[in-house]
Amino acid sequence: MSGTQRLAAEGPVYELTGDSALLERMLLIRRFEDAVQRLFQRGEVHGTTHLYSGQEAGAVGVCAALAPGDRAAGTYRGHGHALALGVDPQGLMDELLGRASGVCGGRAGSMNVVDLRHGLVGCFGIVGGSIAAATGVALGFQRRGLENVAVAFFGEGTSNQAYFAECLNFAQVLRLPVVFVCENNRYMEFTPIEDVTAGEIPARVEALGLWNRTVDGMDVQAVRAGASEAVAHARSGAGPAFLQTLTYRFVGHSRSDPGAYRKPGELDEMRRRDPLAVERARLIEDGAADEAELDGLEARVAAYIDEVAARALEAPFPDPEAEFQEYKG
Amino acid sequence: MSVAELEFRDAVRDALDEELARDESVVFFGEDVGKPGGVFAVTGGLQERHGDRRVFDTPISELAIAGAAFGAAITGLRPVIEIMFGDFLFLAMDSLANQAAKYWFISEEQASVPLVVRSAVGAGGRFGAIHSQTPVPWFQGIPGLKIVAPSTPRDAKALLKGAIRDDNPVLFLEHKRLYSVKGEPGSSDEVAPLGRAAIVRPGSDLTLVTAMKGVHDALAAAEELATEGIDVEVIDLRTLRPLDRDTVLESVRRTNRLLVVEEGPRTGGWAGGILADVAEDGLEYLDDVWRLTTADAPIPYSPPLEDAFLPSAERIVTSVRKHLNSTPVNSTA
């Protein structure tokens, strides 16, 4: 049970290269979520849906620090986690529209997407489920002698779940190669986190002796830098790492949320720190790209997502008869 | 030459030992299972033999134990975990019911979850209301999960091996009152398929369906009733999900009467499900059908209260006599 074998994984379907790769991945997520919102309002996306708009730097920065064969578990706000890992935007959109060509054949829906081919252990509809899943994946990696790491994405509200207390301790005592990424967007659904949380979240983690950092979650380069350290720590065998990203969601918690709980001026202030704008400005300032190139990039991504949405609307629904014959409970 | 009898707890240990030796992807963890060897003295020696990377102790964190087992199961391991008492399974419910059991389906079969949850269940040990339950119905309504419930040492070993080799999550229930039961060992390479009941005593007057300790009560009751000319067929279900309905139905076609004995509350219990299945598919064969369960109340602590509360050989005999209008052979009434 020793060696350096890694689990095979496919590369991202939507390949990115060059200096603007991280910006492009964030754009992909933002335009995807815009399309989901439009399709939801048209009744094409069903049930409920939780958008990642505003938080793109988190998933993109963390996933940029991962190696082939590493795996991540996302949340019910998981489209960003999936796309950052390289899940096919078409397969994901088809899934949200309940189509047979969806990444899970329409069985999963927005809150439960799984795509192991791209390292997505799952999007977990229960708050904290991602923490346990990633802890277990890390246990599998470690006991099989693999050098891979597992990532758990979760929101700040999860710090009050049993999963958080139980699994962080479990992972620490077993020195598991897992990175816990707490995406702190300030609100636990509709409630300010400080109203329902005693003390500071990193203090809980420090008490367990975990390596931990807090980074600006609106800056993809800062997230990537912090995540690279966290991943290196976990991969070294020194045990789990905890990364808090301070972020903000520009949209409601879910479809039914007008955001009445936000503090006055807060949304406008945070929109000025939009991670897409922050990264765009940096690329221009560094001379890595000019305005015209980035305008072109934005237009290409927008057109691509329009095509994805159009194709998803044309995709066939699953056949109930075949489905129920196939599945033997 | 007589073969040495096998104790139930040793049968469980031997199955774990042999599967750990056979397949290096099998790991086993839980509270006090490694160095201490388990609170029911089932798992002693496994850590020494297989090492602390494969057999290890965990914190008291049922949700984390089950959740980590789920994640490990989709990453190439075949974890066996111990949730010390069945009553503690409720703490692991999200990991088991929402994550492990549904993953094969919602992932469109990208990965199965080969996971075994061992848990000690059952009353009669004076453990009180919250260390004595057999929470089968909580799990029986969860598609994607299997439930195994052996009654003999031989079955415990062969079925646990079958459970570990199954690619799906399996809840493996061990009745506390059976740990010290001894029986014939069977062959060491025996692996039992899940989902098959066994007729453990053939009979012609009544089909008595039960599981775990209930099988021993049923066999004792059948011996007593035989002296009165009542010939009882006893079926050991062995697996409670999926249920072997065919074996039950075939038996009822011959005996025309069905009694299901369940150690658990009447409302929402698994006995009711079997009565419903047989009523739906075999109504024309039925002359009588009923169940013997506990009352819809928590399990009491005090010995005389607990004894009176539980199904027993004596209660089975009394109930069968009443339904078949029989009187005891030596009755002076």
Image (cartoon, helix red, strand yellow):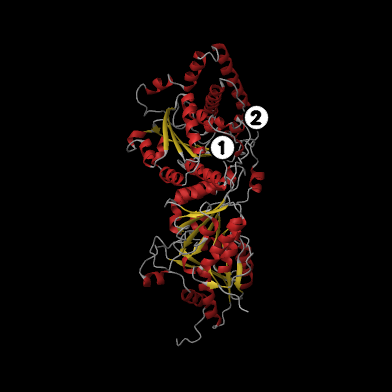
Residue drawn at 60 percent across, 19 percent down:
A300
Q: Earlier in the sequence, mark 1 or mark 2?
A: 1
| Circle 2: residue type | Glu
As drawn, B284 above or below B61: below
Image quarter for residue A308? top right
Dividing the image into 4 quarters, which one contains the N terminus of chain B? bottom right
Estimate the x, y position of residue B260 in percent, counting from the top left: 53, 67
Estimate the x, y position of residue A160 in percent, counting from the top left: 38, 41
Q: Which mark is residue A70?
A: 1
Q: Which residue is mark 2?
A: A314
Q: Which mark is residue A120?
A: none
The chain that hosts pointer 1 is: A
Is the residue marked by circle 1 packed among few (<14), some (14-19), or many (20+) residues within 10 Å?
A: many
As drawn, A194 above or below B7: above
Q: Secondary structure at mark 1?
A: loop
Dividing the image into 4 quarters, which one contains the C terminus of chain B? bottom left
The chain that hosts pointer 2 is: A
Q: Nearer the viewer, residue A79 or A36?
A: A79
Residue drawn at 62 percent across, 57 percent down:
B22
Nearest to viewer (mark 1 / mark 2): 1
Q: Are dots 1 and 2 on a single chain?
A: yes
Residue drawn at 59 percent across, 76 percent down:
B205
- Say whether marks 1 and 2 touch (CB < 8 Å): no
Q: Confirm whether residue B224 shows in the render.
A: yes
For this view, does A254 lie left or right of residue B199? left
